Image (cartoon, rainbow, N blue to C red):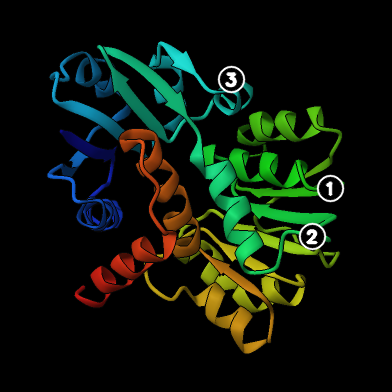
Amino acid sequence: MRCAVLGSPIAHSLSPAMHRAAYAELGLDWTYDAVAVEEHELPLFLRSLGDDVRGLSVTAPLKRAAAQEAHQRSEHVELLGVANTLVVDDGMLSAHNTDVTGALAAMQERGLLSGIRTARILGAGATATSMAYALSTHGLSRLELVVRDPARARETQQVAERRGVEVVVRGIDEPLTETVDLLISTVPEDVAGARSRELTAAARAVFDIVYDPWPTTLLAAAAESGLPTVSGLDLLAHQAALQVELMTGSTVDPQILLNAAMGELATR
């Protein structure tokens, strides 16, 4: 069977290293590749899949489009309109979101899941939407969305507000006026890194979704300040383990995937 990760850009993806490590652990003679696909190319790409394709991981900028293209959607995908996983079964595509459960598992592993009442998310794309929803299921009461374009925050804002969370949208250049329990960054290194000291000074814990470069300036600043952290690699390993289970029907220890990701990074 064949699987792959889709997105653009995609050459930096660690998903091939992780999924191949999972297949080796499970004794599966499967393949997993990285395929560059633009958003407008996704419908035709999905219609051209062969019978030997079992599953697809989906990353930016395809997560919302993937949800729309699926024949069936999990509860999280229906709620969020965001999918990071497509499973193929008899020509039918089912869409799933392992970012939500993967993020919760990663935070639980690092001891950060309880006591998060206030949060600040940098960015408001598909991943930010999943993170806002994940936190809303564990007691979040107030959320700041920090974005370049406030109009782009609307979908993420609506998801959180439907869960009873108070949401404030701020511009990326506005000063930070409050300290939050958790800062989550979904924006590139050049955006968050330049303000890393200011951002970490206004947070009690930091979750940086980005892992390129590794470690990020934001995570390094958080560590220097003695703040608890969750990394993009933690999330990547947990959500990928869930993807492997969806695609193969077998479970694998996320630590095996994390080790594979770290090994791949060490060669770059």
In this view, the residue in front, 158 or 257, is 257
Residue 65 visible, this angle: no
125 or 20, which is in the foreground? 20
Q: Secondary structure at mark 3?
A: helix
From the viewer's side, name the closer residue of 93 and 244: 244
| Left or right: where 189 falls relative to 59 | right
Q: In terms of image quadrants, where is residue 128?
A: top right
Sequence-first disc among 3 and 2 = 3
Relative to 91, does residue 153 appear above or below in the rendering?
Answer: below
Residue 78's tag is 3
Quadrant position of residue 12: bottom left
Residue 44 in the image: state x and y as whole percent: 21, 15
Does dot 1 land on a helix, a strand or a loop?
loop
- Residue 132 % position (x, y): 68, 43
Residue 114: mark in rendering = 2
Dots 2 and 1: beta carbons under 8 Å?
yes
Q: Nearer the viewer, mark 3 or mark 2?
A: 2
Residue beneath disc 1 = 139
Inter-mark Cα distance, 1 to 3: 21 Å
The relative height of residue 44 versus residue 216 in the rendered view (above or below) is: above
State how many labels appear: 3
Q: Amino acid at mark 1?
A: Gly
Residue displayed at 39% across by 40% down: 245
Amino acid tagged 3: Glu
Q: Earlier in the sequence, mark 2 or mark 1?
A: 2
**Residue 14 in picture, x, y percent from top left:** 29, 57
Q: Residues within 10 Å of mark 2 (few under 14, many from 20)?
A: few
> Residue placed at 13% from the left, 19% from the top?
50
The crowd level at tag 3 (other Cα within 10 Å; few <14, some 14-19, many 20+) is some
Please name the residue shown 67% across and 52% down the image: 121
Give percent across and percent down for residue 187: 51, 55
Q: Residues within 10 Å of mark 1 (few under 14, many from 20)?
A: some
